[in-house]
Amino acid sequence: MKTKNTLNRETTHEEILEKARRYGIKFIDLKIDFAFKFVFGTHGKEDLLLMLLDSILPDKHIVSVTLGPQEQMPDNPERRRSIYDIHCVTQSGTHITVEMQYAKQSDFNNRMVYYSSYTLRNSLTRGEDGFEYPELYVIGILDFMLPGVKENPEVVNHYSVRNDRDDGILLTDTLHYVTIELPKFNKQISELDGQLDNLLYLFRHLGEMNEVPAYFKDKNLDKLFETSMFANMTQEQQDRYFREFMYEMDQKSRMRTAREDGIAEGLAEGRSEAARAMKARN
């Protein structure tokens, strides 16, 4: 089987396996889009998604989830379609959309609102006293700090539609937005406390692991580790994962180079300005 890599040349599966060995890939990185959907958004793995959602939303007491379609088509063909990482419905009828975002996006908060609009439109029902919507959560798991929102030290933040002058008053209890900013999570294994901490640690570090740490042996995570092993994936799944892995590595490298070039250019311009100022004084 042949596939395409980021260099736009044909690459055999054997070459991909060799490259994966050179990169030391034992477990897939859950921050990679394909890996996240493969582990948490695939039929037959609803128990892993349930564990994740119950950890993020413990007050909802979620006992079962049903995966829904990942693609929503617009009414107007000129508008953009919406493709979710994961969309599901709980036993109580709550709709939950989950997005894993690896690369920084300056408008991700607006994207969360956009995702919620599709679900609201498609789940609207007409009740006796007016229009009724199901409860809806949009969860964004981010490998960056959410731009455009006041920073705080909390890893997990909950947002809703409230009165600007009295945030104790909800305009509606239908819409809920949750962000998880992984760069804020810096706990070591010895500091982990609870299943949410365990999962956030794995989101950050699973792709770097060569073996399952002893701490995780009795944390009800055996299926997650087994599912996430690169060697346990089919040839097609390995090829697709590695393509996305290399793409994200290339993107990170480009961003780092652009940032370093910008800093260097700024320093050079600063030195030039200082030299011109010194020359003017003399």
Image: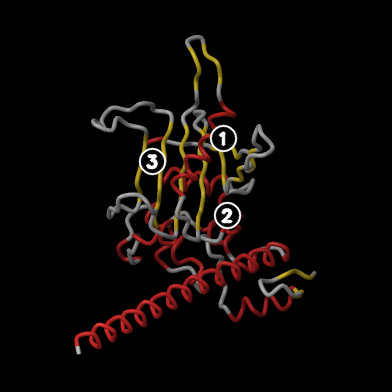
> Label 2: few (<14), some or many (≥20) within 10 Å?
many
Alpha-carbon span between mark 1 and mark 2: 24 Å
Residue 192 x/y as whole percent: 33, 60
Marking on residue 118 = 1
- Mark 2 residue type: Val
Alpha-carbon span between mark 3 and mark 1: 25 Å
Direction top: furthest residue: 128
Of 196 and 169, which appears nearest the observer? 169
Residue mark closest to the camera, 3 vs 1? 1
Q: Are marks 3 and 1 in contact (CB under 8 Å)?
A: no
- Quadrant that contains the N terminus: bottom right
In screen coordinates, is 81 left or right of 279? right
- Mark 1 residue type: Tyr
Residue 158 x/y as whole percent: 35, 42
In screen coordinates, is 117 left or right of 143? right
> Label 1: few (<14), some or many (≥20) within 10 Å?
some
Of 19 and 148, which appears nearest the observer? 148
- Label 2: which residue? 39
- Label 3: which residue? 58
Image label count: 3
